[in-house]
Amino acid sequence: MPALRKYETSHPWLTFKVDLRQVSARLWIALGEAQSKCQHIAGVPLQPDIAAEMHRIYLARGLLATTAIEGNTLTEKEVRDLLENKLKLPPSRQYLAQEIENILGGFNGILKQVERRRLVPLSTQLIKFFNAQVLSKLKLDPEVVPGEIRKHSVGVGTYRGAPAEDCEYLLDRLCEWLNSINAPDGDEVIYGLIKSILGHVYLAWIHPFGDGNGRTARLLEAKFLLEAGVPSAAAHLLSNHYNLTRSEYYKQLDYTSKSNGDLRTFIEYAVTGLVEQLREQIATVQNQQLMVSWINYVHEKFGAQKTPADRRQRDVVLAMSKKGGAFKASDIKQLDPGIAAQYATKTPKTITRDMNRLKKLELVEAGPAGYRAKIEAMLAFLPTSIGKPPQPQPKAQPADKPQLELGLTLPTG
């Protein structure tokens, strides 16, 4: 009988298997919703400039989240400025920008491989390469060598990483295990999401490097998500969730080892947070699409008419739409400088006539708070239950319990 490795005594939860037969129905529902929403985002049509702006926003948030959870103090605006080559930092804070640039380089490298359909199997060498990327050009402690397995004990708080002598072996086991998990056709996002969470937690458990383990884990996470077909704008959302719920993230991570490797609660925590972020992202996409459709609709309503009054009324309703809310008649001419110029020589009666015309065209409506744009006219499929109280649902009988499965016990490698 072969002698036990040291980690088998110190870290018995490193078993390289997970049994998903006993997870809650809530998790299965969330996994299905995550896959569906990722597919919707991937196929949504957006104007190129709007799509590019959304990508910049979520990229900045993701890069910040990946580094902020380990202490980076840059703001989202500063990260946006960095992406646009506009950030100016004093020498004492330059390392913060370097941390962001390292993660960006790693993410872009993964994305290019996926775009070229070159899916590189996970390997210990690749994980080392990710670590070398995240630590590139940073000042490190003397015992930390980027991309090399540590030779000393490390930890986070009270948690200690696996014994240094076992780290290489454990990374080999991790890669073999995750590479053996193959998704059935149509379930790529679900399996990619689970693999990204497993890889993240196991890398945190093993803690194979002297520094940058968390950032390396999040590059590993991005690899699995992007390869599974998660759109790049959504591939950062898990990291953002961990950062926004940082105390809960550490609490959940702590529980995984203290429970002897029970990953069910962490997986549910991660997937639930991802779904919440995907809902927000889809709402943003829908709002952008709604505004584009509304602008086109307003232009169609005025048709070929191009009198000064037509142009002024069109500009007014579009400005109201952009600002949102209701406006008193006296506030209309102050919507923006262009509209103020068009009303400069007009009397209040002109505003009244313009508003009456826009009401007749059903582009605005008047209420106690003032005039507002009727953008909701574009919402063709409102739920029929709006405004109705929720109806009581019958309790499910035991026979109705979902019997969903996801590979049951994943391969042990």
Image: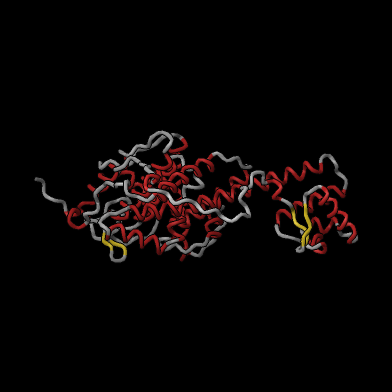
- For this rendering, which residue is in front, 92 or 228? 228
Q: Which residue sits at x=90%, y=61%?
A: 347
Task: Give the quarter of the figure containing the C terminus.
Answer: top left
Q: Position of residue 40 (x, y in %)?
A: 53, 41
Q: Is residue 140 left or right of residue 388?
A: left
Q: Position of residue 406 (x, y in %)?
A: 35, 41
- For this rendering, which residue is in front, 389 or 281? 389
Q: Position of residue 230 (x, y in %)?
A: 47, 43
- For this rendering, which residue is in front, 373 or 45? 373
Give residue 335's quadrant in the image. bottom right
Q: Which residue sits at x=40%, y=45%?
A: 400
- Residue 9 is at least partly visible in this image: yes
Q: Is residue 218 left or right of residue 360?
A: left
Identify the colour scheme used: secondary structure
Q: Is residue 139 left or right of residue 384?
A: left
Give residue 151's quadrant in the image. bottom left
- For this rendering, which residue is in front, 260 or 205? 260
Task: Give the quarter of the figure containing the N terminus.
Answer: top left
- Residue 336 is at least partly visible in this image: no
Q: Position of residue 104 (x, y in %)?
A: 46, 50
